[in-house]
Image (tube, rainbow, N blue to C red):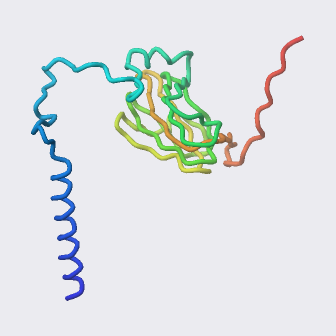
Amino acid sequence: MHKVARIFIGTVALVGIAAVAYAQGGAPSDGKSMADASVKDPPGPVPNPANIPFIPPDKLAGMFAGNGEQQIKLFGDPSKPGMYGVLIKWDPGKGSRPHFHDQDRFIYVVSGTWWVSSSNHYDPKLSYPMPAGSFVTDLANTVHWDGARAGGPPAILELVGMGPVKTIQVDDNGKPLPPRQPATAAR
């Protein structure tokens, strides 16, 4: 018990020292803080895009094109080595079939409701809602499927993972299906 008490006191002392060091190093010399500005004050100048690249929401929303599952690459590339991030939009009544990925993927539901299932059997009425604000992990090599139910709003997701990532479709037994062959042009 005596050793545990010393460890506890030592830990408290280290945390206290770190807090003082942070407060001294992090304290602005001019005494200003974000509490000095209100949302009612006018905005400052646009950030230098060389320092803070950004896409305003209206332009980002305009980058979605098509119907069904739409993607916007935010950074990286899911087909290449390294970290990537995409926005995915599922239109109402659209979704995937049972599949798995060979890499973990991390998803935040930005808006709408994302409907998911971990079943090998595809039945949209058995999907489960993940409302805006939910965080979900697609674990590598585990079957799932997803989309947005009809009658609701689109589901917009932010997805981050490591590439390259492969998507493998499965049958009702969870066994991988052969890769789809590209359609040949009609002659």
Along the viewing direction, whichever of 108 and 86 lies nearer the viewer: 86
The residue located at (54%, 42%) in the rendering is 83
Residue furthest front in the image: 29
Q: Is residue 133 left or right of residue 7?
A: right
Residue furthest right in the image: 187
The residue located at (22%, 20%) in the rendering is 44
Residue furthest bottom in the image: 2
The quadrant in which the N terminus is found is: bottom left
Q: Position of residue 108 (x, y in %)?
A: 41, 38
Along the viewing direction, whichever of 134 and 20 lies nearer the viewer: 20
Along the viewing direction, whichever of 79 and 173 lies nearer the viewer: 79
Q: Position of residue 95 (x, y in %)?
A: 55, 29
Question: How many numbered discs?
Answer: 0
Q: Is residue 157 left or right of residue 32?
A: right
Residue furthest top in the image: 187
Query: Can the viewer see residue 18?
Result: yes
The residue located at (22%, 68%) in the rendering is 14
Q: With respect to residue 17, does 138 lie above or below?
A: above
Q: Position of residue 183 (x, y in %)?
A: 80, 22
Q: Which quadrant would residue 168 be assigned to in this image?
A: top right
Q: Which quadrant would residue 114 be assigned to in this image?
A: top left
Q: Which quadrant would residue 113 be assigned to in this image?
A: top left
The residue located at (74%, 41%) in the rendering is 177
The quadrant in which the C terminus is found is: top right
